[in-house]
Image (cartoon, grey):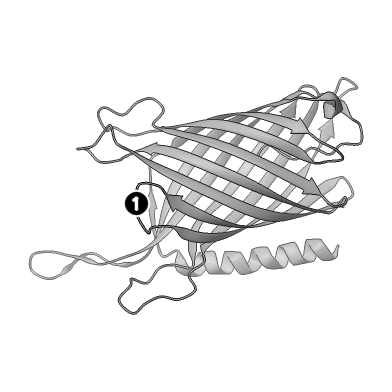
Amino acid sequence: MRSIVLSLSALLVVTACFSAQAQRRTKGASVLQPQAQVELPLSGNDYLFGAVNLQHFDTDLEGTPLFSGQGLRLGYEHFFNEQWSWGAVINGQRVQSNSLYAASSYTHVLLPEVFGRHWNTFGSVNFRQRLAVGYNWPLDVTNAGRFLASLRLDVDRVFPLGSTGFALRPRVAFEPVAYLRFQRDEFEAKEPFLDFSELRGEVGVRLSSRFDFTPWFAWQNAYNIALPQYNADGTVKIPGGNVRFVQPTLGLDLRLTLGKSAGSAERRQLPTQY
């Protein structure tokens, strides 16, 4: 119960920061993101996983391929006990440039991170908190890396249906990502406290102990502090200030679980978002 209260308190604090800085809202193109995953269970609840994903942006730019973004994820997690674990993940992303004059150019980003997770249950409901620190490293831009910290709060419940292993897993998750800037020089532009946030809802469908899939929908938000834009006569055309860029995303995760312990009755498996 104590962890649930702490989770709700943290969510309220984050939501207050979220509301305070989100003054102007801009909606971007919708994104479709299919993802295929392979998970290898180890001893206890430990595991290795690998995933590849594709991203389709609903845009009218000419020359844009069907999937203009590709991603690769590799990760490991070790459980100390039923409640605590730690792990490491490396994310690689390749996204096509949005420039009209460079339709064939791509940006490449590498994001290694380490995290700790707390997992508690209240009855049949799972409550989890995942705190991570990572480094967002654009490989195409010199000296543009950023240290990031994220806190994911999620709740779900597994509903077994029958004795064949079929089950449903509805889940809601909220994750803000903050830019860890320890000191800002006077000549550098002011930046918002939050870099990114995501509110995600999903329903996992487990067909067997070896295969499951998860359709999901998320509101992804990017934050920025924009400078005002002026007309020729000096009047304000577009006001500056805090801007929230909203991008609705629809995804589908397909997961294949390998190894002899995939069907172990004692093993607890995480959602496909990990």
Q: Nearer the viewer, residue 27 or 137?
A: 137
Q: Quadrant of the N terminus?
A: bottom right
Q: Nearer the viewer, residue 197 or 135?
A: 135
Q: Name which residue type carries label 1.
A: Val
Placement of the C terminus among the 4 image quadrants: top right
Percent from the top left, x then y, of residue 59?
33, 34
Q: Residue at x 87, y 36 (%)?
A: 267
Q: Is residue 274 visible?
A: no
Which x, y percent locates residue 246? 44, 50
Dot 1 crowding, Cα within 10 Å, few <14, some 14–19, many 20+: few
Left or right? Give the position of 189 relative to 232.
Answer: right
Decide if residue 117 is on the left or right side of residue 261.
left
Where on the picture, by quarter, is residue 62?
Answer: top left
Q: Label 1 belongs to which residue?
A: 141
> In the picture provided, is 219 more to the left or to the right than 175?
left
Relative to 78, residue 143 above or below: below
Q: Residue at x 52, y 49 (%)?
A: 111
